[in-house]
Amino acid sequence: MKAHKMFATVKEPRKLVLDDVPFEKGQRVEVLLLAPDHDETDRVKRLKALFKETRTLPQIQTITEEEIAAEIDRYRSGQ
């Protein structure tokens, strides 16, 4: 099955037009429409609050930039 992902904006109620799709005339396709959750911004706010709280932990205050870079390198190398 060939898949093609694209984003479109509904400009008229109950109607969506897709242009430049990579399929031939008459080809049968399956269409699945997904709309992002409205609480997505709430999740982002909660994640930012978690990051802020994490940065205030005492054990975080002693970590150096060099240690962070080394940890990132170890992670990227699969160690």
Image (spheres, rainbow, N blue to C red):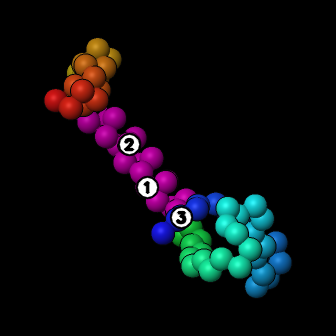
Is 42 in the magenta?
A: yes
User: Percent from the top left, x then y, of residue 21?
Assistant: 70, 64
Q: Is residue 20 left or right of residue 51?
A: right
> Residue type at mark 2?
Phe
Residue displayed at 37% across by 48% down: 50
Distance between the Cα atoms at labels 3 and 2?
A: 36 Å
Q: Is residue 27 visible?
A: yes
Q: Which residue is mark 1?
A: 46
Give the label, 3 or 2, closer to the camera: 3
Is 19 in the magenta?
A: no
Distance between the Cα atoms at labels 3 and 1?
A: 33 Å
Q: Which residue is mark 2?
A: 51
Residue displayed at 42% across by 51% down: 47
Q: Quick one: label 3 or label 1, which is nearer the N terminus?
A: 3
Which mark is drawn over residue 3? 3
Residue displayed at 38% across by 42% down: 51
Which mark is drawn over residue 24? none
| Closer to the camera in the image, 51 or 69 | 69
Q: Quick one: label 1 or label 2, which is nearer the N terminus?
A: 1
User: Percent from the top left, x then y, of residue 55?
Assistant: 34, 35
Q: Secondary structure at mark 3?
A: loop
Decide whether the magenta segment is chiefly helix, strand or loop.
Answer: helix
> Residue type at mark 3?
Ala
Q: Is residue 62 left or right of residue 39?
A: left
Residue farthest bottom in this picture: 14
Residue displayed at 64% across by 60% down: 6
Q: Is residue 65 left or right of residue 13?
A: left
Q: Is residue 24 left or right of residue 73?
A: right
Establish if 44 lies above or below 56.
Answer: below
Give the magenta-colored segment's residue range: 40-58
Q: Quick one: label 3 or label 2, which is nearer the N terminus?
A: 3
Establish if 44 lies above or below 62.
Answer: below
